[in-house]
Amino acid sequence: MTSVPQVRSQAGPPVLDVTDLSVHFSAGGRLLGRGRDVVRAVDGVSLRIGQGEVLGLVGESGSGKSTVGRAVAGLLRPTSGSISLGGREITRLSRSQMRPLRRDVHIVFQDPYSSLNPRMSIGAIVAEPLRQHGVARGRERDRQVDSMLAKVGLRAQLRDRYPHELSGGQRQRVGLARALVLRPRLFVADEPVSALDVSVQAAILNLLTDLQEEMGFSCLFIGHDLSVVEFISDRIAVMYLGKIVEATTRLRLFEQPQHPYTQALFSAAPLPDPPLQRGRVRIVLSGDLPSPLDPPSGCSFHTRCPVAVERCRSDEPALTEVTGPGHAVACHLVDEHGPPDVAAAVAAGTAGTKEDRVHDQA
């Protein structure tokens, strides 16, 4: 496994510190006679999240984003690597050892209906973390539940209703209340608005931003919609096929995307200005995301990259800060002269090389 540098936090001591995290699953059977198939869902991810910081994790479906979130939340046991929460290693803890630490990290899921127990009332769902950890009883528990429901914009009268009686946006607010009622240090949001209408998405994002500012928790926000991730994140890490390929601040990533995959993601996102949208070059990636059962050699993106060269097929690029501190990129074609212009290469029908770009800038 190739060790990669941390996706650095600028927000002081890390609340979450993930080093070389790998999560592999056995798929059974055999692949080309090489023994049991192994799905490399996450393969060497390292990142840090500081106090009160929001790190966005973005990538297309199958890139491993949700697997990272579930491993951080303790729902999946990593194959290798380490996860530290507040400076304490939690990767190898037993269930009994992990139990008191579960107060410090909570997760909200993508589907606001299937993640709630249909046989429990809203009040019982939100109160369940308090009951499990013995935090409050009786009237005090009811008071905390009512207070949390109010924070997420729900009336206390809804506490006696059941999930099927609420709208999708209300159910997601219940999920937020349940995850935050214990005031965790780290909150994992696994695509919390992707199943909601656009108008409801905006309301939930504004609510989450207000809660984060008020309660001060750190957040790992997982998504595939760039506009959503841009709105809520302080820093953003881009994942492809189980690895982080680029990571930097929100502003720098949107102003200067370096990796060809990041540039392709941005070209797929519509612009609010029609003339600019009509004039842009669409970077269409060929083929589908490779199977994590049999990932490509070298750079995992080279099979779809419009500007890949021979070195990309054989050597795996390290995640390094080539263009300056705080902006890490895993690409052989990114150097001190900047990134390859993938859109120009696509428009010209040519891949271009690193040597060509250096010569042009000279």
Image (cartoon, rainbow, N blue to C red):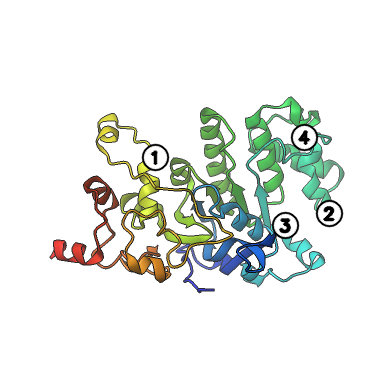
Vertically, is 45 above or below 130? Answer: below
User: How far apart are the alpha carbons under marks 3 and 4?
Assistant: 20 Å
Q: Which residue is drawn at 26% across and 54% down?
A: 341
First in sequence: mark 3 vs mark 2: 3
Which amino acid, mark 1? Ala
Tell me the kind of residue under disc 2. Gly
Judge depth for marks 3 and 2 and give the one in front.
Answer: 3
Q: Determine the CA span between mark 3 and mark 2.
A: 11 Å
Q: What element carries label 2?
A: loop
| Classed neighbour count for the residue bearing mark 2: other residues with Cα under 10 Å, few (<14), some (14–19), many (≥20) | few
In the structure shown, which secondary structural element does the residue marked by tag 1 occupy? loop
Closer to the eye: label 3 or 1:
1
CA gap between label 4 and label 1 equals 37 Å
Label 1 crowd (10 A; few <14 / some 14-19 / many >=20): few
Label 4: state its secondary structure: helix
Q: Which of marks 4 and 1 is in front?
A: 1
Q: Mark 1 points at which residue?
A: 269
- Decide if residue 325 is in sight here: no
> Is 92 situated above or below 291?
below
Q: Name the residue under label 4.
A: 122
Lower position in the chain sequence, tag 2 or tag 1: 2
Q: Where is residue 283 in the image (x, y as percent from the top left)?
A: 34, 45
Label 4 close to label 1 by CB (< 8 Å)? no
Please report whichever mark, 3 or 4, sits nearer to the chain's N-terminal start. Answer: 3
Q: Which of marks 4 and 1 is nearer the N terminus?
A: 4
- Residue at the disc numbered 3: 103
Q: x%, y% of residue 354?
A: 25, 65
Q: Distance between the residues labelled 3 and 1?
A: 37 Å
Mark 2, residue position: 134
Q: Is mark 3 on a helix, strand or loop?
A: helix
Is mark 2 in CB contact (under 8 Å) with mark 1? no
